[in-house]
Image: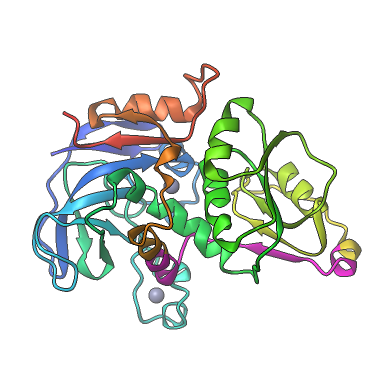
Amino acid sequence: MKAFVVREPGDVALREWPEPIDVEDEVLVTPLIAGVCGTDLELIDGSIDLAYVRYPLVLGHEWVGRLEADVVDVGPTGTHVVVEGIIPCGVCDACVRGASNLCHVYDEIGFTRPGALAEHVSVPCGLVHALGDDVALDDAALIEPMAVVWRALTRVPLRRGLRVAIIGDGTIALLAAHLVRLFEPTSTTIIGRRNEQRELATSAGADEFVIGTPQASFDLVIEAAGAGAAVASAIERCARGGMVILLGLPPHGTTVALAPDDLVNNDVIIQGSFSYTRSAFADVVRRVNGGDLRPSFLITHRFSLDDAATAVNVLRGNEMTGEPRGKVVIDLTRG
Ligand SMILES: [Zn+2]
Ligand SMILES: [Zn+2]
């Protein structure tokens, strides 16, 4: 079959790849739509910690597909499904207490085992979730990154009526604006870098899109730019009694100067969040199936699998022509 494979860091191409072999308790799925993201660039470049990757690697960890066999408690052949990417062992202490994102045996589709940028992928049956008949594939393709954001939001004591700021204007920032609406904030401000993203920010539900750091302070500041300076300004912009969520991943080794007395005096929560738990993923699937979340407005670029290399270029910003850039997807239903 055809697959988009990183043979080793720096060497990515569409290649012939063996069809998945039959494995007990796994099912074959045909990927239909798959997003690509900054993490894929790190996997291509080899800048990701080697504990989280195994080469050669078929990319693709944000995706929706179609079952190629019946799965008990999920559905018959042909059912549209999403699949949790992290494969938890289920028995380590992290798994037992529900922190499956911290499973001691790290294994993840599109990182340590073949991903969805291929004609077929084999996945554990227990991690498959059926989609409702009326769920659009484009909305479902964004479930994985939404689960990452959702898990972060549900780690802190959110309540209604917060003044929210989100630093960054990439997909994760825009999804954060879309998801935080469920907590009925008083206002949501996106602090971005590219004016071209303004319309997407509005579609995501942001009340305000600003370039440069505003002087106001906020009850909840979400750092989704992945830069040390953004982390520092997130903490600075946090109101007394407020919360800071760190969603962006600055380059390894980045440090940030802190004024700990301010953190104490201001009674601030700073929360990091890694990937998603099984329950966060299931929550997001439920909300997508229930119609609360329709994030497909974020998809701005679409390519066939044959054009996956172009998709990667767009993602890198190499073909940036002053137009908005939301989610870049590969549509595997296109020939
Ligand atoms: Zn991703
Ligand atoms: Zn485990």
Position of residue 214 relative to residue 186, above or below, is: above
**Residue 246 appears in which quarter of the rendering?**
bottom right
Q: Is residue 46 left or right of residue 310?
A: right
- Name the residue at 17% across, 40% down: 17
Q: Nearer the viewer, residue 6 or 40?
A: 40
Magenta-colored stretch includes residue 71: no
Magenta-colored stretch includes residue 264: yes
Residue 160: % across, % down: 65, 66
Q: Is residue 228 left or right of residue 288?
A: right
- Name the residue at 22% across, 50% down: 65
- Name the residue at 61% across, 60% down: 184
Viewport quadrant of the C terminus? top left
Q: Taking the image as four quarters, which one is ligand 2 found in?
A: bottom left
Q: Nearer the viewer, residue 209 or 40?
A: 209
The residues colored magenta run: 263-283
**Residue 218 appears in which quarter of the rendering?**
bottom right
Asked whether the viewer can see residue 147, the reply is yes
Asked whether the viewer can see residue 57, the reply is no
Position of residue 22 relative to residue 192, above or below, is: below
Q: Nearer the viewer, residue 284 or 30?
A: 284
Q: Is residue 44 left or right of residue 124?
A: right
Viewport quadrant of the N terminus? top left
Residue 203: % across, % down: 52, 39
For the image, the number of numbered tags is: 0
